Amino acid sequence: MNEQLVARHWLVIIAPKAAPGIATSTVLILARIWNANGAQHSLGNAVLMTALSLGAAAAGACASIGRAGDSIIAGTAFAASGGLALAGVAGYADGWSLPLLLWALATAITYGLAARYWRTDRRKTVAHERQTIERREEYAHIERVETLRATTQIEVARTGAAYAEQLAQALVTRAALPGFDPTPLERAGLPALPSLDMTKEH
């Protein structure tokens, strides 16, 4: 029942919360590096990024349709589509105004979606912890009841053994006295004690 408590490092706690911001910031930085290296006003690069973004969005739409749809694949495809669109605009546009606006919008949307997932995950974690605690309490109660029952049985057995020993000792002591007649005891249903015969022999 005693569990070892492990304190998690603060980076492990913060990393999931910082991941969406790090992801969108990384896309923005790489897109601006790409902009500085020839992507600015490049029609071919813009068409390529548009096609990739639309392809990822279509893949996400296909993955989310029907009963066999997978939400994880769909979410990943839509995130890739948004990342490609942000990279394409940030790489093609002049200045920082539009890229920063899209970065802020993408970061807000990403955190909104992640917050929903975090709430669901937290709810499942709390439910699992509550169920685990209830199960442990139930097992502890059963263990206590079984321990009390076993202790009671042992005490009853000890009491019965002590009573039988005292009765046998009393019969042996009584048989040692002169004029003892075991016939009434045998009529009462008590078994004959071997020690009686031994006492008579001595």
Image: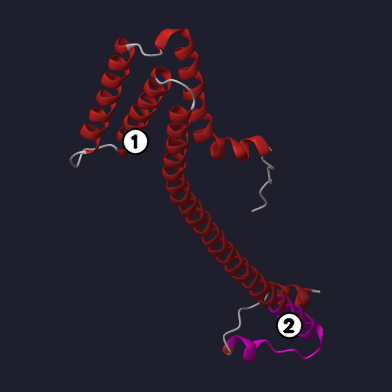
Residue at coordinates 62% horizontally, 36% vertically from top-left? 12
Residue lying at 32% horizontally and 29% vertically, measured from the top left: 77
The image position of residue 87, as x and y in percent, is 41, 22
Residue in the image at 75% along x and 89% along y: 180
Q: Which amino acid does label 2 sit on?
A: Leu
The dot on residue 44 is none
Toward which corner of the image does residue 38 lie, by quadrant? top left
Q: Position of residue 6 (x, y in %)?
A: 68, 42
Is 171 left or right of 90, judged from the image as shown? right
197 falls in the magenta region: no
Q: In this view, does 94 lie above or below 2?
A: above
Q: How crowded is mark 1: few (under 14 residues within 10 Å), some or many (20 or more)?
A: some
Question: Which region of the structure is painted magenta?
Answer: 163-186
Element type at marker 1?
A: helix
User: Viewer-proximal residue, 112 or 202?
Assistant: 112
Residue type highlighted by circle 1:
Gly
Q: Main secondary structure of the magenta part?
A: helix
Instruction: Report x, y in % for residue 137.
Output: 57, 63
Residue 74 falls in which quadrant of the image?
A: top left
SS for dot 2: helix
Task: Report which residue position mark 2 lands on.
Answer: 171
- Please give the label number shown on residue 75: 1
In the rendered image, the vertical position of residue 178 relative to residue 147, given as above or below: below
- The residue depicted at 42 percent of the width and 32 percent of the height is 102
Q: Which of marks 1 and 2 is nearer the N terminus?
A: 1
Q: Residue 164 sits in which quadrant?
A: bottom right
How many marks can you see? Answer: 2
Picture layout, residue 98 above or below residue 41: below
Residue found farthest to the top: 38
Question: Is 174 in front, or is 150?
Answer: 150
Circles 1, 2 touching at the beta carbon (< 8 Å): no
